[in-house]
Amino acid sequence: MATFELYRRSTIGMCLTETLDEMVQSGTLSPELAIQVLVQFDKSMTEALESQVKTKVTIKGHLHTYRFCDNVWTFILQDAMFKSEDRQENVSQVKIVACDSKLLTQ
């Protein structure tokens, strides 16, 4: 299964990576097992988002930068507004990373 490292730069992903690095350095965990944990983390996050998130959000903002590389879109928006059915949030800058979820199961 191909996976993207989409969630590793989130707060929880960075904390997991840091903890695994410490465990590898102390000899508690092998590097191979640490890599397997990270791959499983990406897979679990993808599955959770596909099956558990049901809210739709509208995003509006000024497109600052966009790129498409290795089947992954990256957008940087400035003065973005996130709007759902019951809530609205304004953010000065946001980075959105998106890929085709079908590629995760190939």
Image (cartoon, rainbow, N blue to C red):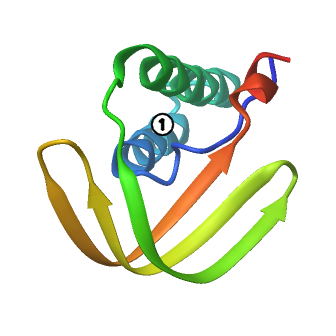
The N terminus sits in image quarter: top right
Between 34 and 84, the residue placed more toward the observer is 84
Residue 81 position within the rendered picture, expressed as x and y whole percent measured from the top left: 31, 69
Instruction: Depth check: give the residue in front, 72 or 3.
Output: 72
Q: Residue at x 35, y 46 (%)?
A: 57
Q: Amino acid at mark 1?
A: Leu
Question: Which residue extends farthest front?
Answer: 85
Q: Callout 1: 10 Å neighbours few (<14), some, many (20+)?
A: many
Relative to 23, is 38 on the left or the right? right
User: Does 56 sit above or below residue 30?
Assistant: below
Q: Residue at x 76, y 70 (%)?
A: 67
> What residue appears at the point 72 percent right and 57 percent down from the top-left corner?
73
Vertical comparison of 86 with 38: above or below: below
x and y, in percent, of residue 15 in the image: 36, 46
Tell me: 7 left or right of 81: right
Q: 95 or 14, which lies in front?
A: 95
Residue 28 x/y as whole percent: 47, 25
In the rendered view of the protein, which quadrant contains the C terminus?
top right
Q: Is residue 52 left or right of residue 36?
A: left
> How many badges with numbers are in the image?
1
Q: Is residue 5 above or below residue 88?
A: above
Kindly state the secondary structure of the residue where label 1 is placed.
Answer: helix
Question: Which residue is label 1 attached to?
Answer: 20
> Considering only vertical position in the picture, is 40 above or below 98?
above
Q: Residue at x 70, y 74 (%)?
A: 66
Residue 91: quarter of image:
bottom left
- Find residue 58 and report its horizontal and vertical position in percent: 38, 53
